[in-house]
């Protein structure tokens, strides 16, 4: 357990105040989730009791309410973990699409098992339930980024890049656009009228109904 008093850095203090400003007077305690995320990021990926107590005082709310939030949501850690959180989705769609292989490669490349951190304190590996991007399964959630459409080799390349201090491009690893079918579009093949490109050439001057000089239309008399 940390014994160093916790307080937001000046940068995070400014962010915290911006979050608080989104809530009506007397409802600032509703900002607990973004503030808790700030505190966890600042403290290297986990929340010591000192940070939780600081948040309770900061939001003028009972400590137990802060403890309840920290222990309820899986994205918060109340014990020391590696700074970079690597989460493998294991819910049915990801499992059917190969999450076993993704998890195996993570363990082999990092040299740890689920629930463990690497010896250098950089990485923490865990399983997660449903990341909500089932059409792009299987998925890794690394810090704030999703890596989608994975297999063993693609997973290994991502982990090795992270180990080198790089930040691989997030999203689909197969080039898929959003959640489009893997084989490409099968419907809605044409652009809707409002997305059509402009005509190759504007209509000739005088061919339209509107006057070209900004004056009133001429009468037919």
Image (cartoon, rainbow, N blue to C red):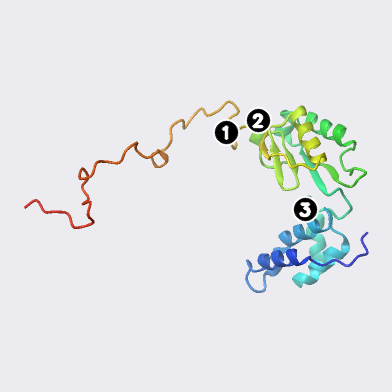
Residues at marks 3 and 2, CA–CA distance in whole angstroms? 31 Å
| Residue on which the image places disc 3 | 73
The residue beneath circle 2 is 174
Q: Residue at point 86% right, 48% down?
A: 82
Find residue 42 and report its image quarter.
Answer: bottom right
Between discs 1 and 2, the one toward the N terminus: 2
Q: Quadrant of residue 27?
A: bottom right
Element type where label 1 sits in the image: loop
> Which marked residue is nearer to the observer: mark 3 or mark 2?
2
User: Residue 150: percent from the left, percent from the top?
Assistant: 72, 31
Residue 89 x %, y % = 75, 38
> Mark 1, mark 2: which one is toward the viewer?
2
Q: Earlier in the sequence, mark 1 or mark 3?
A: 3
Q: Tag 1: Cα neighbours inside 10 Å, few (<14), some, or many (≥20)?
A: few
Mark pair 1, 2: CA separation: 11 Å
Q: CA distance from mark 1 to mark 3?
A: 30 Å
Residue 180, which numbered label? 1
Please state which of residues 160 and 114 is positioned toward the viewer in this rendering.
160
Element under label 3? Answer: loop
Horizontal and vertical percent for residue 207? 21, 42
Quarter of image, res 97 = top right
């Amino acid at each position: 357990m940390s014994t160093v008093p916790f307080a937001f850095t000046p940068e995070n203090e400014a962010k915290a105040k911006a979050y608080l400003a989104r809530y009506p007077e007397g409802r600032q305690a509703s900002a607990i989730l973004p503030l808790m995320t700030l505190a966890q990021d600042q403290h290297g990926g986990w929340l010591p009791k000192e940070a939780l107590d600081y948040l309770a005082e900061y939001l003028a709310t009972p400590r137990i309410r802060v403890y309840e939030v920290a222990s309820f949501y899986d994205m918060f850690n109340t014990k020391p973990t590696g700074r970079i959180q690597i989460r493998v989705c294991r819910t049915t769609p990801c499992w059917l699409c190969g999450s076993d292989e993704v998890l195996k490669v993570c363990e082999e490349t990092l040299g740890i098992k689920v629930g463990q951190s690497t010896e250098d304190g950089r990485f923490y590996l865990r399983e997660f339930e449903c990341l909500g991007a089932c059409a792009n399964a299987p998925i890794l959630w690394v810090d704030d980024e999703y890596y989608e459409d994975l297999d063993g080799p693609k997973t290994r390349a991502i982990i090795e890049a992270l180990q080198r201090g790089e930040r691989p491009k997030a999203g689909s690893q197969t080039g898929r656009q959003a959640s489009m079918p893997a084989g490409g579009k099968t419907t809605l093949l044409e652009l809707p009228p409002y997305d059509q490109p402009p005509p190759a050439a504007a209509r000739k001057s005088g061919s339209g109904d509107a006057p070209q000089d900004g004056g009133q239309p001429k009468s037919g008399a």
